[in-house]
Amino acid sequence: MFVSVQGARIHFSDSGEGIPTLFLHGIPDSHTVWDDVIASIRGSYRCIAPDLPGFGQSTVPTGFGVTLNGMADFVDAFLAALGITEPINLVVHDIGGPYGLAWAVRHPDKVRSIAIMNTVFQSEYRWHRYGRICRTPVLGELLQLLTSQSGLAQAIHRNSGLHKPSRAHIAATYRGFTGPVRRMVLRLYRGLDPEGFAHWDEQLRALAARVPSLVIWGDRDTYIGNAFAGRFGSRQVVHLPQCGHWPMIEVPDVVSRHLLKLLAIAIGTREGIHADAPKASLERLTLRGGPAEAR
């Protein structure tokens, strides 16, 4: 499906019924990265997953600003275009984090719950090697030009855990890694400076302490160290020691199970768990051979 948002043609999936639950993907993915998780969630919730501007089949709004304010404006305009006015569940990963979390900070009254996976929203973070190259003129263009399917596969494997994304998934990701997408990748890395997250991250921590919130973190991620998992202010942090950057691809059943628990807590509430409620203790999930139950 498509909808017009800020003059751009935005592609999205919309399935299930119930409380709207928004899924925002990362680089270099599209909305399809959530397919396995949504298949487990849509029986109880309305699951909405857009291709972010410049990714998948979505175009980029004219004058789109690669800033936290610009990203927040896009998310709000997207929800408005779908006629969604009630508070939503928000699920973010990678670059979807700055989009969704900036929106949540700007519109806390529209947030029912927050689930965060392997993303960054802290001013002390510094870009990883790939990001630093993308931010460098000429070198970034050369990197995007020379990235082959085998090179993309190697990068994905390096940042995955025991359960590697399938060849079919990698091939589909590469087919979607078109010229416009590669240019958008450069635009995002060059437009966002983590130092600009200052004060936004403080407001996010305050919000995450007030509404039902969850961090699910693949500890084998080399893009973002697992020390950042505990810096979002979330009441619960689930570590996946044998998982990498893409929990929703590597262990979708584990991700779905934890999301369903979070969304159940959020049902019927607008403000979620009150700030004076005790915080849940840190939970660590151990994988042995295959996805295991949280212990």
Image (cartoon, helix red, strand yellow):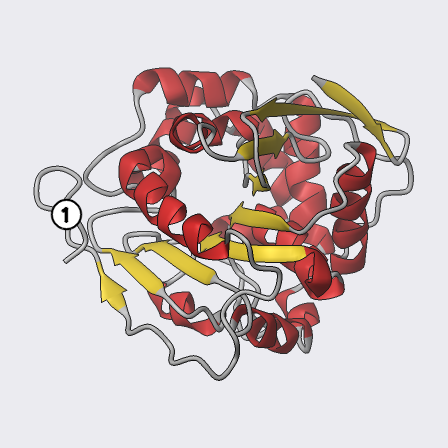
The C terminus lies in which quarter of the figure?
Answer: bottom left
Query: What x and y, as percent, mark residue 134?
Result: 60, 46
Query: What x and y, as percent, mark residue 210?
Result: 55, 72
Q: Quadrant of residue 16?
A: top right
The outermost residue toward the bottom is 276
Q: Does residue 293 appear left or right of residue 55 in this picture?
A: left
Query: What x and y, as percent, mark residue 158?
Result: 30, 41
Q: Residue at x 66, y 69 (%)?
A: 197
- Image vertical order of residue 123 relative to residue 34, above or below: below
Q: Residue at x 40, y 71 (%)?
A: 230
- Image vertical order of residue 80 relative to residue 266, above or below: above
Q: Determine if residue 255 is in view.
A: yes
> Foreground: 79 or 32?
79
- Residue, disc 1: 287
Q: Does residue 30 appear left or right of residue 80 in this picture?
A: left
At mark 1, the secondary structure is loop
Q: Does residue 21 appear left or right of residue 190 in this picture?
A: left
Query: What x and y, as percent, mark residue 65?
Result: 83, 49
The N terminus lies in which quarter of the figure?
Answer: top right
Q: Quadrant of residue 251?
A: top left
- In the rendered picture of this protein, how many numbered marks are placed on residues? 1
